[in-house]
Amino acid sequence: MAERRPVTNARTTVRVGEESLERGAGGELHQTAGADTPTLTTAQGIPVADDQNTLRIGARGPSALEDFHFREKIFHFDHERIPERVVHARGMGAHGYFEAYESLADITRADPFQEKGKRTEVFVRFSTVAGNKGSVDLARDVRGFAVKFYTGEGNWDLVGNNIPVFFIQDAIKFPDIIHAAKQAPDRGFPQAQTAHDNFWDFISLTPESMNMVMWIMSDRTIPRSFRFMEGFGVHTFRLINAEGKSTFVKFHWKPKLGLQSVVWNEALKINGADPDFHRRDLWDAIQSGNFPEWELGLQLFDDDFADRFDFDVLDPTKIIPEEEVPVRRVGRMVLDRVVDNFFAETEQVAFCTQNIVPGIDFSNDPLLQGRNFSYLDTQLKRLGGPNFTEIPVNRPRCPMHNFQRDGHMKMDVPKGRANYEPNSWGLGPREDPVRGFRSHPTPEQGVKERVRSETFADHYSQARQFYLSQTETERAHIAEALIFELSKVETPAIRARMVAHLLNIDDSLARNVADGLRLKDMPAAADAALPTRQDLKESPALSVILNGPGSFAGRKVGALVTDGADAAVLQALKAALEKAGAMLEIIAPRIGGVEASDGTWIDADHEIDGGPSVVFDAVALVVSDAGAALLTNKPPARDFIADAFAHLKFIGYVEAAKPLLQKAGVLDSLDKGFIALSGPADAAAFVATCGDLRLWEREPGITPV
Ligand code: HDE
C-alpha cells in the first residue's frame, strides 16, 4: 500500500522584500486570516480553510465533485457578465449631489427645486455611444451624460448627452442609426468609430441628421475630460407648478471649469497611451478632492414662444439658441464620491427616461416618446428581472410602497396578507390624489397615421448656423474631421453624397472637404425639402474655444525631468500650479525617480515611455545638460516634445533642454507657446499662459486643410 500523505500541507512563513508572508502547498505566497484580516467564506458564509487547492483524491488524483467551495466559486465566476448596454456600453459613474440656488416653486413643484440650498443626492454616468464596453475613451463619439436624482418624491432620470441635438427625429429609426454606427455585422469591425461606409451611407441618406453631423464632426466629440463638457437633456420637457401651470424647458449642464477638447491626432494617440483616459481623469479628480462641478441651466419658454420660434420645439434635431432664450442657472451638481464597486454601481445603474417626478412632464417629442418605451425594456434584459429597482444604486432614497410582488431576485420581504388593493383589511399603501404624479392634461386630437410633421422639414439651416458660429480653428477641425472620416469610406459615391449635403450647409466647407478628398467632380447640391436659411444669427455659445476656462484650474502639466534637474524651478512650478488649482506630474527616464540639482530625490509618476505628452495639458522640460544628452537618443523623449508642439501645447523649458528641442525638430519654430524657465520666477508666468490651453495660432502652419 502506498504511503499515506498528510491531509494538509505544512505552511511556512517566508520573507519577500519587506513583507512576511505564508507559503502554501503550491508555493503560493499569501496571508491567512488574523486579527485585522477577515476570514474568507463561501457565499453561504461557510469559513474556507484552503482557497489555493481543489479537493482531490490523492495529491495527483482526480478532483472530488463534493468540493462545494470550488464549484460555487467557478459557478459564480461563469456568471459574472451581464449583457452590456447596446449603446453607451462604455461608461464611468460617480456619486454626488445637486444643490438648488433658489426656490423654483413658482415654476415647478419638483422636489429638488423647492427651497434654496436644498441638496438632492445624484448618481451620474458618462459614456460613449458606439463602442463596446472594452473600447477606448477617446473615440470620436457623442458622450452620454445621464443623471439620476434621488428626490424625495422618487427617482428622476435626466438621461442626456453632451450634444443638444440628435441624429434622427423619430425613435423608429434608432436601431438603424445604431446598427449603421456600430461594427458591420459581417466582419465585426470597425469598433468604436464612425469612420466607415455603413455609418456614412446611412447618414448621407438621412438629411435630418445634418445638424448632428456638424456637432459630431466638431471637437465636442473628443472632449479632454468629462469634467470639461456640457450636458443637455436634448428634448423639450415641461415643468409644472402646484397650480398645474406648465412651462416648457430645455435642460443644460455647464461645467464649472469651462469647455475643453483635445485635437484629433492627440485623441488617436491618447487611445494608445491610456485607453481609460476619461475614466482615470474623473476618478483622480474626485479622489484628490477636486470635485467636478456643473451648473444646471434651464431654458424656460411658453407656448407663445414655441409658436413663434423658427423651428418646432418638439424636433430633437434642433436647438433653441441661448441668445434667444437665455440659460437660467438654478443650481449646481457636485460629484464628490467615486463608486465602491464598478459593477454594482456603474454597470447596474438603470436609467429610464420615463422616470420623472411630480412637477416634471414629457413633451410630444417623438424621440422622447419612443425612448420612454425603450429604457425599461432594456433594463429588464440587462439586469435580468423586474426587481432591478431594489439594487442599491437604483433604489429610491424615499419610501417605496406598492403591491408589486415576487419575480427574480426579490430583495425586500413584504409583510402581511394583502398583495392587492382595494382590500378591506386596511393593509398596504393607497393612492394620494394630491401628492401623486398627474400628467399635464394637454388636449390631444388627430388622425391615426404614420407621418412626420412638416414643421420638422428644415434639415440644413441650423447645421449652417452651428458651422458659422465656430471660430476659424473649429471650422477647420470640422472640415478635417469630415475629410478623415470620409477618407475611410471605401465607396466614392457615399463621399460625393456627403459633399452634396455639405453644399447646402456652407459652400466653402463643402469645397474644402471636396478638395481634401480630392473629389474629381463636384456634385450638385442635394435636393432639399426646404432651402437653407441664411438669416440665422451666429451663436457664440456653440463654440468650445469661445467657452474655455480662462484659467488652468483642474488641468495638468507633465514635467520631463532628469538627474540634476533644477530643483528650484521644479518647486516653483509645483507651487504655481497648486496655486492655480492645477497639477504637476513627473516623467523621468526611470520610474524610481531622479536626484535633483540640490540632492533631493524626486519620485516619478511615469517612466518616459509610459507618460507621453498627449496625456497632459501642457509640458515642462526641466533637464540637466547631462540628462538632455541622455534623452536626445530616446525616441519617446523626442515624441514627447514633437507631439506637444504639434498638439499646440504650451512648452516650458530650461536652457539645458535646447538640444532636446533641436532633436525634436522644433528649435527653429520657437513661437510664443515656448516659455523659457530661466529661473523659479518664470514658473508663474508659464502657468498663467497655460490658461489659454492651446496656442491655436500655431495650427495653420502645421496642419493646413
Ligand atoms: Fe438612449 N438608450 N436611446 N439616448 N441613452 C440607452 O438604455 C434609446 C437617445 C442615452 O449611462 C439604452 O440603459 C432610444 C438620446 C444615454 O446607462 C436604450 C433612443 C439621448 C444612455 C436607449 C435613444 C440618449 C442611453 C441602452 C431614440 C440623449 C446611457 C442601455 C429614441 C438625450 C445611460 C440603456 C447610462 C442608453 C434607447 C436616443 C441618451 C437602448 C430608443 C436622444 C446617456 O434603452
Image (cartoon, rainbow, N blue to C red):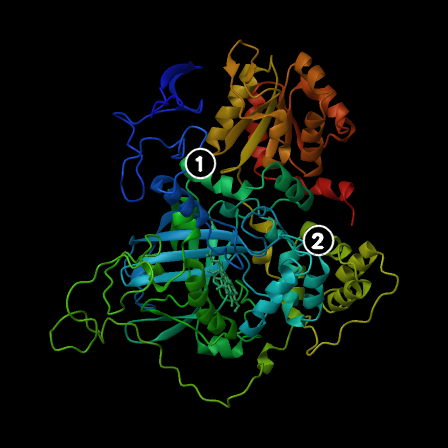
Furthest residue to the top?
599
Furthest residue to the left?
425
Q: Position of residue 280 (x, y in %)?
A: 50, 39
Vertical placement of residue 277 versus 19, above or below = below
Residue at 76% over, 24% down: 663
- Residue nearest the observer in this picture, 240 or 209: 209
Q: Position of residue 101 (x, y in %)?
A: 34, 54
Quick one: quadrant of the N terminus?
Answer: top left
Q: Position of residue 572 (x, y in %)?
A: 52, 21
In this rendering, does residue 502 appear at all?
yes
Vertical placement of residue 128 versus 701, above or below = below
Q: Earlier in the sequence, mark 2 or mark 1?
A: 1
**Circle 2 SS class:** helix
Q: What distance separates the C-alpha of mark 2 from that of mark 1?
A: 60 Å
- Residue nearest the observer in this picture, 99 or 444: 444
Q: Position of residue 460 (x, y in %)?
A: 67, 70
Q: Amino acid at mark 1?
A: Pro
**Circle 1 SS class:** loop
Q: Amino acid at mark 2?
A: Ala
Dividing the picture into quadrants, the one containing residue 439 is: bottom left
| Eye-nearest disc, 2 or 1 | 1
Marks 1 and 2: in contact by CB < 8 Å?
no
Vertical placement of residue 58 versus 539, above or below = above
Query: Residue 62 has which mark?
Result: 1
Q: Which residue is mark 2?
A: 481
